[in-house]
Amino acid sequence: MHFYTIIMEKERLNMNLLDEFQRYDFSKIKEQNIFLVGSIRFKDYFIKIESILQIIFKKVVYLCSVDGLLNKHQFSVEEWDKLQEIAIKKLHNHDALLVIDVNNYIGEQTSEEIEYFQKVIKKPVYFLSKLQS
């Protein structure tokens, strides 16, 4: 086995992970501070895209709540509503939004965040589905 292959197997951004996302052109995102939004059902995408954007594209990437992303089913309705309120507040600190819309799916809460970002904050919104090359 070649030395480079051994190293790549130990790296998080190995060829298997990168091949999964090769059809997306993340270089279209010009802004520096990116906030990821989307459905909890795509949590694996959030985790992988966060690493790709940070390590390869040197972006500063944020998520609303890692605990919320990984454990949504454990939160009460009141706790989840509070997390959503915080997510809206956090939107103000970012240059752009990246919507993780796998198979063009966008949930109700994500739609609200997108609408707020476009109408109130008035900064760019990117959709993963539209970054496909």
Image: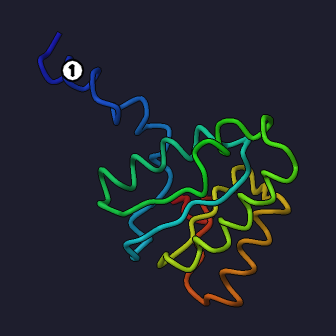
Q: Residue at x 64, y 60 (%)?
A: 37
Q: Residue furthest top?
A: 1
> Where is residue 31, by image quadrant?
bottom left
Packing grade of label 1 (10 A; few <14, some 14-19, many >=20) is: few
100 lies above or below 114:
above
- Report whether 50 appears left or right of 37: left
Write down the residue under mark 1. Answer: 5
Q: How is the image coloured?
A: rainbow
Q: Amino acid at mark 1?
A: Thr
15 lies above or below 23:
above
* Location of residue 30 in the rendering, given as x and y in whole percent from the top left corner: 39, 76
Q: Which of the two residues, 70 or 98, is positioned nearer the viewer here? A: 70
Q: Which of the two residues, 79 or 60, is positioned nearer the viewer here? A: 79
Q: Where is the N terminus found, in terms of image quarters?
A: top left
* Location of residue 7 in the rendering, given as x and y in whole percent from the top left corner: 19, 23
- Report whether 17 appears left or right of 107: left
Q: Residue at x 47, y 67 (%)?
A: 34
